[in-house]
Amino acid sequence: MEDLVSINNLNIEARTRAGTLKVVNDLSFTIKKSETLCVVGESGCGKSVTALSLMSLLPEGILNVSSGDILFDNTNLAQLSEAEIEGIRGNDISMIFQEPMTSLNPLFTVGEQVSEVIRRHKNLNKEKAWVSAVELLDAVKIPNPDKRAFDYPFQLSGGQRQRVMIAIALACQPKILIADEPTTALDVTIQAEILALINMLKQETGTAVMFITHDMAVVAQMADRVVVMHPGKKVEEGTVHEIFNNPQHEYTKSLLAAVPKLGEMASKKYPEPMRLVGEKKTKALKPIVGTNEPLLEVNNLVTRYPVKGGVLRRTVARVHAVEDVSFTIMKGKTLSLVGESGCGKSTVGRSLIRLVEPTSGDVNLDGQNILSLNQKDMREARSNIQMVFQDPFSSLNPQRPLFDQVAEPLRNYGTVKREILQEKIGDLFDRVKLPRSFMQRYPHQLSGGQRQRIAIARALALNPKLIIADEAVSALDVSVQAQVLNLMMELQVDLGLSFLFISHDMAVVERVSHDVGVMYLGRLVEIGPRQAIFRNPQHPYTQDLLKAVPIADPDKRKSERDLNFKPLPSPIHDLNYKAEPSVYRKVAKDHYVLTTDCGY
Amino acid sequence: MLENEEIEEPTIKPVKEIFQTFFKSYSAVTGLIILIGIAVMGFIGPIFYPTDPFDMVWMPFSPPGADGFLLGTDYLGRDILSQIINGARVSIAIGFSAALVSCFIGVGIGSFAGFYGGWVEETLMRITEFFQVLPTLLFAMVIVALFGSSVLSITLAIGAVSWASVARITRSEFLRIKELDFVLASRSSGSNNMALIFKVILPNAAAPIIVQSALLVGAAITFEAGLAFLGLSDPNVISWGQVIGSNRVYILDATYTVTFPGVAIFITVLAISLVGDGLNDALNPKLRSR
């Protein structure tokens, strides 16, 4: 087939204060008509920059193409004038971005934004453009498009906004659609729908797709061919089956090894660290058996936030963030809470250490009821439960050196004498495998994975019994994610820690947990041993969630027919609303499924 | 391919980096040099040019350069050069201490309002708004008239009317930062509220507060000049505004009597703005990487 895009020996340089830096190094590849090419690589590997250079949108003076050609439809983009490029951009090449929250203009209705693009490129009058805008919104499957066209972006959900972005991108039937991590910010069910939509539109319109992602599972779902990039260079190129079944380059192999695949743990009773290529033979861990002694018992936990309104700022409604949730965490074991954004899983974690005050319920840690403690005793109790947060960039104080940050809990509780503080912190750095020379560094000098190790070291400082890991690895690149997960499992074996692992990523959860709880709209809809949940999901929501997870195997693609998710209802209810108690049906030993109507 | 295999870089403290950025900006350094020059002139200058600014040393309205007086004499025959040299001391002192006063009030009110929220915030911010809508010059005049025109009362008056902007900025920074995970992390590792406010959040909110306070210094200097122009200055010390005020009647006949002190105020405030801009660039991490 004919080449639509061919990039030859492309070099892109970044100008920084420290000098010029090669961001893209001698890159060549082609995209054929109506094929999907996935460009995959970890953050900072130059994949987005390549896409921007294809759009001629590189920020001038900061990033420059130093040599190489970009041929689009046999024309060299470098030889075109700005006006000619504007004719191509949006018309023949269009792009969708990662963040649906910020890529639409908040001041115009979505109908206006779609029809504006149509008017600019097709010379239609206002009414005709509006009609075709509504048709486009229908094509990207926005329900009631004639009415939703009058909505402003803030009235749409993240997934719907990304659909609008796709509608805008496809408005002029481009020859190629560049999608830069279009589903990274979305929940897995919505991601599955958007991926299916892009696949369907591609088949209907015959447009080529350049799909940029860091997620091998998404690659397996989308790609015809794959380009693997590793710091600025192409390390491997091939069809999707070649890459997944017979990877040649070490980097590709390690990337694939680091991706947890849903289902690969089905036959294993206990969690297992990931085997990493390139790392020295990891010492074989003892199986992470844990005990059957309960550490934390949570009964009927309810957390509601007030919604204030009116002149007097009275409470007018309540957000039912956590509604009648009960579970038990055993000593030395990991319980995972999974669910999509807004399901209340993070609020559960924060309620347990009363960073938010629960409305009612019992939380027993080793026989001590946490919710009835006064402030002073609560402070003591907190030393037994520590948290690791999601975003490694905001969870460390940028103004203080790492030593102080890890030492902060020890100083607060005064448990360690000053003379041995240095040694103690050094031990903690060893534990999380960071060199002791890092102690006087500042957070901005570390990579994301290193920061997360510091956060873990800080959590370990007080010898807690339970660590709440709130999406602790979801902001990390896969190979780093695997290392941090392995570290957590190693600590569990060595120290007998319990984890409450809060995550949206089913594949990671399958790797690390002994028990799994699935949350939806504030309720725990299903809870049980990991194998039972993954092999024999009972609740319709659990079943749909498992169906939505992309699998890093090109032979297990999903078609759009499999996917039919219901939109999330609002968890905000007025003051008179009486929430029903959660009633569970026993499926097997320790495996319970919710029978109360949870809105799904 | 382990992540620890990163290039070893020397440990640079953020503070050092801030200074580096600041001193790379020509305009900021120029401003700082001018400012230091004016301060040196005000505090050490009188030793080298001992003429008393209140003494009648020559006949009135001697034009600049004539009779050995570089900037001439005013309507009472006082040496304008000496007035400018000695006035610098008062302007700089009042400017900085008034800014410090408003910084203290503003940071105190803004941080508590932002941190605690709820009725604390409502009350404190209503008070702030009250001070923001008050006609500041009038209010300062009332304070000075009540407590007498001494350097101290003028400083406090200026500080008392100009803290509202600092309070608003502090509050908005606190609202933003208190939601960040490292504050939650610090709380869950046992820090109490005072430690959170002053040790964790405030250092991270410092950048915009410092910039705003730097700009307040310039505002306070012009404010003082305004008060002095209206006759509300300490009669025992000379200040630039006072010189302009007392010579204002002769603005058409002896323009230089008001021009020189005016230029002095202009240059000082301009220098402070340049320093403020430089601080803004140096402290704002988004601009720093450029």
Image: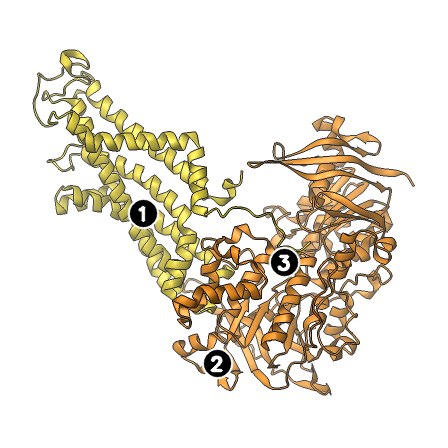
Distance from Cα at disc 3 to Cα at disc 1? 45 Å
Q: At numbered mark 3, what does the secondary structure look like: helix, strand or loop?
A: loop
Q: State whether residue A390 is above or below residue B68.
A: below
Q: State whether residue A14 is above or below residue B73.
A: below
Residue A527, how many percent across, how many down? Answer: 68, 79
Q: Closest to the observer: A330 or B126?
A: A330
Name the quadrant containing residue A7. Answer: top right
Q: Closest to the observer: A16 or A520?
A: A16
Circle 1 Cα neighbour tier, 10 Å, few/some/many (<14 / 14–19 / ≥20): few
Q: State whether residue A318 is above or below residue A228.
A: below
The residue beneath circle 2 is A370
Residue A393, how many percent across, how many down? Answer: 55, 55
State which chain is coloured orange.
Answer: A
Q: Are marks 3 and 1 in contact (CB under 8 Å)?
A: no
Name the image quarter holding the C terminus of chain A. Answer: bottom right
Name the quadrant containing residue A562. Answer: bottom right
Number of the label disc, if any, that sits on residue A475: 3
Of mark 2 and mark 3, the one earlier in the sequence is 2
Name the image quarter holding the N terminus of chain A. Answer: top right
